[in-house]
Image: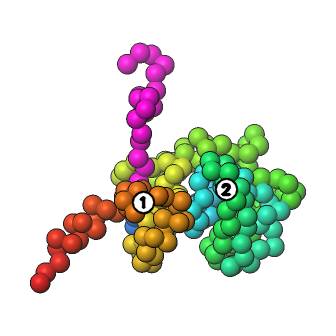
Amino acid sequence: MRKGENSNRPEPGSTIKVDPIKSKKDIAAIKKILADKPRDLALFAVGINTNLRASDLLRITAGMVRGRKPGDDIELREQKTSKLRRITLNKACIDAIQALLASREYKDSDNLFQGQRGTLTVPSINRLVKGWCRVINLRGNYGSHTLRKTWGYHQRVTFGTDIPTLMVCFNHSTQRQTLDYLCIQPEEIRGVYENVL
C-alpha cells in the first residue's frame, strides 16, 4: 500500500457489509456510555428505533420533533429515494429528543443533530458508531448503517415482525434481500436444522 492510501476503503465496485447490534445487552451498554452526551444518545436512540438511513437522520430539524409525544409521526423525504416517508416515534426516541432539545438552544429550522461546525455528516456518524462499538469491545464491522440494521434485526428477531412487513419498511423487492440485509438468514437456516422431531 502506498503512503496516504486508506486500507479501509473498499475496492471500486465492491461493498462492505456492516453488522447490526444483535444483543440488547450491548445496546444497553452503548446507551450507558452515551448517558451524559445528549446529542449522541438521541442519534443512537432515533437510529435504532426507526428505519431511517443516516443521511435521513441528518435531515430531521428541531421543528419537526419539538412537542412530539410517543406515537406521533414525522414526515421527511428520503434523500436516496426521494420518497416521502412517515416515521412513528416511540418513547425511547421522544425521551432522547426531549433531552437533546433541552441541552441547548434550537431554532425550529436547525438540524437536530449538530456537530462542532454545523450539521453532522454521514462519515462523522460512521466514526461515532464505530467508536461506540469499540468502547464496549463489540466484535464485528460497524458503521452508520448499523443503526438502521439494528432496528430491522430486532423487529424480526426480538419482536417477530414478519418479513413482508419489513420488506415494505425497507423498500426491498424480495424477501431474500431483506433477510440478507438483516444478517439473519444464516441464523434462521441453522435454527431449522436444530429443530428436533
Magenta segment main secondary structure:
loop
Judge whether residue 9 is colored magenta: yes
- Tell me the magenta residue range: 1-20
> Residue at 81% across / 68% down in the picture?
66
Vertical order, 98 against 83 (above or below): below
**What is the C-alpha distance between the residues marked 1 and 2?**
19 Å
Mark 1 element type: loop
Image coordinates of residue 84 in percent, x first then y, are 70, 59
> Residue at 42% across / 70% down in the picture?
163
Query: Is residue 164 visible to us here?
Result: yes
> Residue at 40% across / 67% down in the picture?
23
Q: Is residue 8 left or right of residue 61?
A: left
Label 1–label 2 contact, CB within 8 A: no
Q: Residues within 10 Å of mark 2 (few under 14, many from 20)?
A: few
The C terminus is located in which quarter?
A: bottom left
Instruction: Name the kind of residue labelled 2 in the image.
Output: Lys
Vertical order, 39 against 25 (above or below): above
Query: Which residue extends farthest bottom?
Result: 197
Image coordinates of residue 29 in percent, x first then y, are 48, 65
Task: Identify the residue under disc 1.
Answer: 174
Query: Is residue 134 visible to us here?
Result: no
Q: Residues within 10 Å of mark 1 (few under 14, many from 20)?
A: few
Q: Is residue 144 left or right of residue 191?
A: right
Query: Which residue extends farthest left?
Result: 197
Image coordinates of residue 65 in percent, x first then y, are 77, 66
Instruction: Name the kind of residue labelled 1 in the image.
Output: Thr
* Camera-side residue of 80 and 152: 80
* Camera-side residue of 189 and 120: 189
- In the rendered structure, find residue 83 and report the number of the disc placed on it: 2
Q: Earlier in the sequence, mark 1 or mark 2?
A: 2
